[in-house]
Amino acid sequence: MSAQHDLTKNQEMVLGALSAADGPLSAYTILDRLRDRGFRAPLQVYRALDKLLDYGLIHRLESINSFVACAHPQCHGHGSIAFAICEKCGQVEEFSDAMVQQHLSERSRERGFKPSKTVIEIRGTCAACLAA
Amino acid sequence: MSAQHDLTKNQEMVLGALSAADGPLSAYTILDRLRDRGFRAPLQVYRALDKLLDYGLIHRLESINSFVACAHPQCHGHGSIAFAICEKCGQVEEFSDAMVQQHLSERSRERGFKPSKTVIEIRGTCAACLAA
DNA sequence: TTCGTTGCGTAACGCTATAACGTCGGATAT
DNA sequence: ATATCCGACGTTATAGCGTTACGCAACGAA
Ligand SMILES: [Zn+2]
Ligand SMILES: [Zn+2]
Ligand SMILES: [Zn+2]
Ligand SMILES: [Zn+2]
């Protein structure tokens, strides 16, 4: 599961781009940033993203079609993570809440629903942008 | 806010398509289903969807780029609604959980984040598909 | 060797959403 | 009434997101 995955060159470059960024990036933005490193086609990015998602090194933000490096790799089990996404500056905070997880899986179980992945994305305005 | 909005012809047709469907529809699927009623372009659908979202008559499912008629119009305040989306059959169940809402807004407030819209989408397998 | 698996490169395509234009008709004001 | 404004509409084109399909190369297992 977490045997310090050997990343391929492409995967490392994509992860590097996401880690270097100060916020989430779309696949095509990643592509543009890696063009001078040899990237030419969307698929190169998407294939790397798929693996990095598998490995739990990055997350996909469904509501903005973007990707972000995991803030706590090794740390959380990636059960259900929540994201606070600032609509002003684009910053994202990643956190997890056991209570929320528990309630949601309980509500799921009640109706016989077996969850595989839970998306929790809170859109709004971050503290910094509120202060400004 | 909820003065039984007068829907335009396009808006009624789009809402009708969503209500008649047995699951969420993409904008382009709606377009196809309304072609013989005069629809020709995506924008006709998207403009109607925008209004219907404003009015709270439909919801957007961010993780599958689709739209669904609200299961409880008039009933809930559309603060934070959760959706259980079956990946086998496509059925969606809409529900809201005060506990989850409360915890999430508390966690938001802790970090000075002001939420505007909360997305909660649980992907998985529904009871019917599990039984099958 | 042979075969299956995995990653890679390229091209083409399909799906999702918006921009930019002009038009029309109903409401309001003078 | 006439001028004006505004919201919805129709059309075309374009931007942005994601996948299919093909072939090739490397590697390890049988
Ligand atoms: Zn994470
Ligand atoms: Zn911000
Ligand atoms: Zn609803
Ligand atoms: Zn199902």
Image: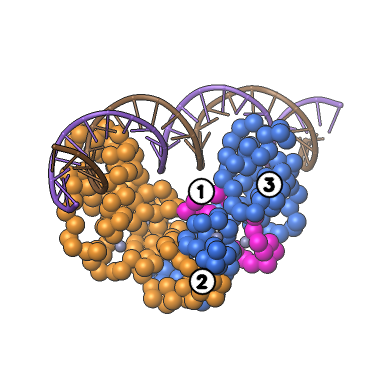
Chain colours: A orange, B blue, C brown, D purple
Label 3–label 2 contact, CB within 8 A: no
Judge by depth and name the residue closer to the eye, B115 or B24. Answer: B24
Q: Residue at x 27, y 53 (%)?
A: A52
Q: Chain of mark 1?
A: B
**Image vertical order of residue C14 relative to residue B122, above or below:** above
- Amino acid on which disc 2 is placed: Ser
Element type at mark 1: loop
From which residue to which does the magenta span run? B61-83
**Which tag, 1 or 3, sits closer to the chain's start?**
3
Q: Please indicate whether residue A86 sits to the left or right of residue B59 in the image.
A: left
Percent position (x, y) of residue A39?
Answer: 24, 35
Residue labelled with disc 2: A108
Kind of residue at disc 3: Ala
Please say if A18 is above or below A80. above
Side of A17 where A108 appears, left or right: right
Callout 3: 10 Å neighbours few (<14), some, many (20+)? Answer: some
Q: Position of residue D29 (x, y in %)?
A: 17, 53
**Chain of the residue that carries numbered disc 3 in the rendered image:** B
Determine the CA span between mark 2 and mark 1: 22 Å
Q: Nearer the viewer, residue A9 or B114?
A: A9
Please name which of the two marks, 2 or 1, marks the residue nearer to the observer: 2
Q: Please tell me which residue is depicted at 23% across the width and 66% down the height of the picture.
A: A74
For the residue carrying disc 2, how many other residues have a C-alpha within 10 Å: few (<14), some (14-19), or many (20+)?
some
Q: Is residue B15 visible?
A: no
Q: Which mark is residue B106?
A: none
Q: Nearer the viewer, residue B80 or B124?
A: B124
Q: Which mark is residue B17?
A: 3
